[in-house]
Image: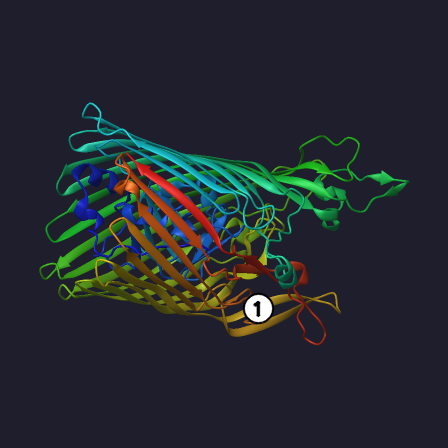
Amino acid sequence: MTMVFSKSIFCQSDSSILNKQNELQEFVVHSIKVDEQKPITQTTLNRKQIEAKYFGADVPSLINSTPSVNMYSDNGTGIGYSFFRLRGMDQTRINTTVNGIPINDPENQGVFFNNFADLMSSAESVQIQRGIGTSTNGTSAFGGSINILTKNLNEASEVSINEGVGSFNSQRTSVEMQSGLLQNKFMFYARFGQLNTDGYRKNSGSQIRSYLFSAGYKMKNAMLKFNAFGGFAENQLSYLGVDKTTLDLNAKSNSFINGESDKFNQQFYQLQYTYKFNANNYLFSSVYFVRSSAPQFQFMFPQSWGMPFSYFNLPDVISNNDTLKTAGNMMTSYRLDQTFYGGFLTYNFRKTSWDLTSGIHVNSFSSNHFMEINYGSILPLEFQQNHRVYFNTGNKNEASVFIKFNEHFNNSKANLFVDLQSRISTFKYKETPMQIRQFNYSVENMKWLFFNWRCGFTYTFNALHKMYLMQGQSSREPTRFDYFQDDFATHETKQNDIKSESVLNSELGYEFTHRKFKSKATIFLMQFENQIIGLGQLNNFGYPVTTNVKASYRMGLELDVHYKINNFLQVYNQSSFSKNKIDKVTQFYKTTYAYSDSVLTYNNVNLALSPSVIINQGIKINATQWLSFDFLWRYVSIQYLDNSEDKNIAVPEFNFLDSKLSIQLDKWIKSGKPVLSIQLNNLLNEKYCTSGSVASATNTIDEFGVKGTTPLFFAAAGRNYFVTLSWKF
């Protein structure tokens, strides 16, 4: 739950305001980020718009008012672990890049902005492409892609300070500096940020320190740039929802009550080189290195979930001459140690009526997964601290090549766009044998080869009307969790156990612009084969338990309408209306009267966690040159938690109102540009939930067909505030 504000619809495009130096810097994402002439459904937030929206809640909150986006937060605030779905698909099906670096975990495709929170303080632009978009680095986009470009190095020096405090003991400090151009060659940028919150829910606090550093060396027709960014995050866990009874008694409840918490460090390093041969030829190259580790992920096994000592790689414990059957309460720590490196090369050639962009991207990823025991209520005498339970390594490698062709016809009124990509990906798994635990299942070495394509046409009738048509197909491999549903192999695993998924995506867009009015409307159809969907339950790490379904589709209408009534009043609406269906799906239930599972088949049902209606209605009031108000009303329709289309197993529809007051203090303070903003979220104090899941243990059915499934909910915070003082010098 967060406030998102109106964006100006009369600003220049990014390309029209770039100076020569910024053009060289932004070419880094030329092959990924698209402009208005490309037939790609997208929304781009520039630096000015990001500054107006961002107050500390992370990327999901920032983009939440753009069409077809629906975010939720573990702790209810948007600061800390928060996530989003785009066209009903979660972040494992959404490609995310920063300066062209893919930041989806290569094995499990998750994205955790929490690990380097406050990155938006250093963002030059954020582009949200909906649908398969254009080809990109990393795994193929299904729901869409998020392309983030960090701040350009400026030739003018600047210092900026942001200090904020809010509800739930939330606090943000961010300090950044631009050196300006030194010795006519060098430029530097640095930011340090810290975010803290106790969270709305109990035991759900977060403490995150983050940074970004850039250094550039300017040449006549080239630029060398180094970027380093990352974070150090400590969080209390709150990724499980609560049942309806508990929710009604205390919406702040959290089922993690034993000190469950995690720590995660992630550091990104990138070297970029851009060379402009002439006005028609650009070459860009980049290499990157990413180091990640999880020093702690404490998870309590109450009464060991009935598991024997051997499950924890421990010898049996004998008490009073009896062998104990279970290991008692066991506090474990899941650990990660990851290395990721790669590079990409892009070449662009332009002529008067056409341009051609080609490129290659390769990377390699290695991740050690292991679990240790911190302490337990029953342990063997020979137990040593941090006893290792298991250790396995996943290796994921990929390479892709692409070519994109753009042709202008009829005095640039018509534009043809073709995008072809070939991508290969491999995965290998190795588990180290343990002394007692003998769970070493074999996992087949896997290899996938995909050919993805897009073809589209844009036609600009005149200054008022423009339309585009795009069709393309994209395919992608399953994730490690799709195969294992756990942190280690739980069975003999073959590549074909889970099928690769593919989608045929069609987009038809129309844009109308007249003086103070601008509108975009997009009709989309996404037809999936072997789509990997969530069944409603979550695994131990908060990822959805998944399966293939043979045929499914998502279709709908997206609106993006802005109207500047006068200099004092603007209104906007960014909404989506969709239909998200599975032709046929099988759900498994534990029977309460027999040993075997019950299998129910559902036909033509709604996909889980895919609301059919999302409405964002905003208004911006510029009361004076120094005082403005923003209001956003948001409505989200019912979200089914599994694929049975049962209204009793669903997140009810909800709506809320956010507001913001901004005061330009330079009217009274002549030093720098101070701005005071007061964020009021959920102004009417509505009680609502943003997302949920299904309790695995209660996914039962009796002999009369009555399901015992228990829905779990994530509560959003009630009325809350965040006050920020921003000061630029």
Q: Position of residue 573 (x, y in %)?
A: 32, 64
Which residue is more in the foreground, 296 or 455? 296
Q: Determine the image quadrant of residue 68.
A: bottom left
Quadrant showing the C terminus? top left
Q: Residue furthest top?
A: 183
The residue type indicated by label 1 comes to Thr
Q: Residue furthest bottom?
A: 704
Q: 631 left or right of 71?
A: left
Which residue is more in the foreground, 686 or 382? 686
Label 1 Cα crowd, 10 Å radius (few <14 / some 14-19 / many 20+):
some
Q: Secondary structure at mark 1?
A: strand
Q: Position of residue 526 (x, y in %)?
A: 38, 65
Q: Which residue is under mark 1? A: 586
Q: Determine the image quadrant of residue 116.
A: top left
Q: Position of residue 314 (x, y in %)?
A: 74, 38
Q: Is residue 398 visible?
A: yes
Which residue is more in the foreground, 547 or 514? 514
Say which residue appears at 54% left-offset and 67% top-offset. Answer: 643
Q: Residue furthest front?
A: 668
Which residue is more in the foreground, 274 or 200? 200
Q: Position of residue 4 (x, y in %)?
A: 37, 55
